[in-house]
Amino acid sequence: MMTTPIDMRSDTVTKPTAGMRAAMAAAEVGDDVFGEDPTIQRLESRVADLLGKEAALYVPSGTMSNQIGVRVHTQPGDELLIEATSHIYVWEAGGPAVLSGVTCRTIEGDAGILDVSQLENKIRPGNDHYVRTRLVCLENTHNRGGGRVYPLDKIAAISAWARKNGLAMHLDGARLWNAAVKTGIPLREWARHFDSVSVCFSKGMGAPVGSTLAGTKDFITKAKRIRKLFGGAMRQAGVLAAACLYALDHHFERLADDHRHAQIVAEAIADTPGLRLEFGKPETNLIWFECDPALGGAKIVAERLKANGLLVASLGPYAMRACTHLDISRSQAEQAADILRRTLRSMTPVG
Ligand SMILES: *Cc1c(COP(=O)(O)O)cnc(C)c1O
């Protein structure tokens, strides 16, 4: 019997629900470049309010949102400080260099988390030989750190230090929603330590398209110009923003389910010989794990899982990731756990 595979490759694979599609179909729209799309305006002011910022801007992707943030905060020849496994540095096609003429100084964190002591000696001296250190970028939750929630006290310490030294702070909050639900700490409590915050609607929130960048009015005025420059100014995109508003109403609190389902999958990985959780028990919806090299590599293990009905991502020679999301029910998480156990039992180590 051929059934649809359980797709845990990413939390971006969700499809809009019937309710979300109905909200999209009913959306009031206008030309947003003319400032005439009421649904986009509603989303922007709602996100600004949730994040405790003066203004916000709807953009097509998290990558664009982050890269607009970098561009507004910097000049060519500046440098930003960032954890070495961050999305902005690793997975955005060299955006800071290409789009802003900015170098990235990378620092290795603990599961993506930096301590202020690691940053304190990283500001370049103020003379003609050096780049100008301008910006600190953090990621919460940190994807390549197993979806780790950035401890708020660490953020507060880094932010206080950055402000004292005249550096701007940008948050890649693609999954800030998950951090807020996991800890119960409101979005604006996280956001107040940053000059700009990017949040994504196309991950756990389950919308098809869109991210929102928030900051001061002045920052967003500048960001709007850069959005135009990067080709991200859209017209009747209220149909998309309606999906994001729907997600805020219906898909935010339920992220707790994804976190519970991740525990079910993680437990199976933890007690299956040949697999190992890379960062221990997951805190949120991302489960990074490694396979025993004797099994032939992540691609081979992923292929075998696929043949048994489970899709996961292979993201390195031995590194693998499974994500829980809106389209994974509790029973599918249990089935996935079962497929992991069964598949690994059937694999014989090579060599
Ligand atoms: C997915 C992701 C982004 C960017 O999202 P896109 O919409 O795919 O461009 C940014 N940061 C993190 C941490 C992400 O996981």
Image (tube, grey):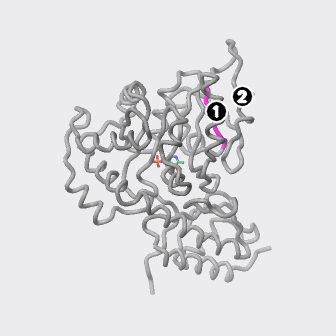
Q: Amino acid at mark 2?
A: Lys
List the single residue furthest toward the bottom: 1
Q: In which quadrant will I find the C terminus? A: bottom right
Going from N to C along the chain, the mark reached first, 2 or 1, is 1
Q: Residue 324, position in %: x, y?
A: 51, 65
Taking 346 as reference, is 16 left or right?
A: left
**185 shown above or below 204:** above
Q: Residue at x 45, y 33 (%)?
A: 68
* Residue 280 numbered tag: none
Marks 2 and 1 in Cβ contact (< 8 Å): yes
- The residue to which callout 2 is attached is 122
Q: Main secondary structure of the magenta part?
A: strand
Please give the residue where the numbered disc 1 appears in the rendered image: 81
Q: Nearer the viewer, residue 6 or 248?
A: 248
The stretch in magenta equals 79-84
Magenta span contains residue 32: no
Figure quadrant of residue 346? bottom right
Most extreme residue toward the right is 351
Q: Secondary structure at mark 1?
A: strand
Element carrying mark 2: loop
Q: Quadrant of the N terminus?
A: bottom left
Q: Residue at x 63, y 69 (%)?
A: 266
Q: Callout 1: 10 Å neighbours few (<14), some, many (20+)?
A: many
Residue shown at 37%/53% (left/top)? 248
Q: Indicate the position of residue 141 as horizontal and vertical percent values.
A: 57, 50
Percent position of residue 23, x then y: 25, 57
Q: CA distance from mark 2 to mark 1?
A: 8 Å
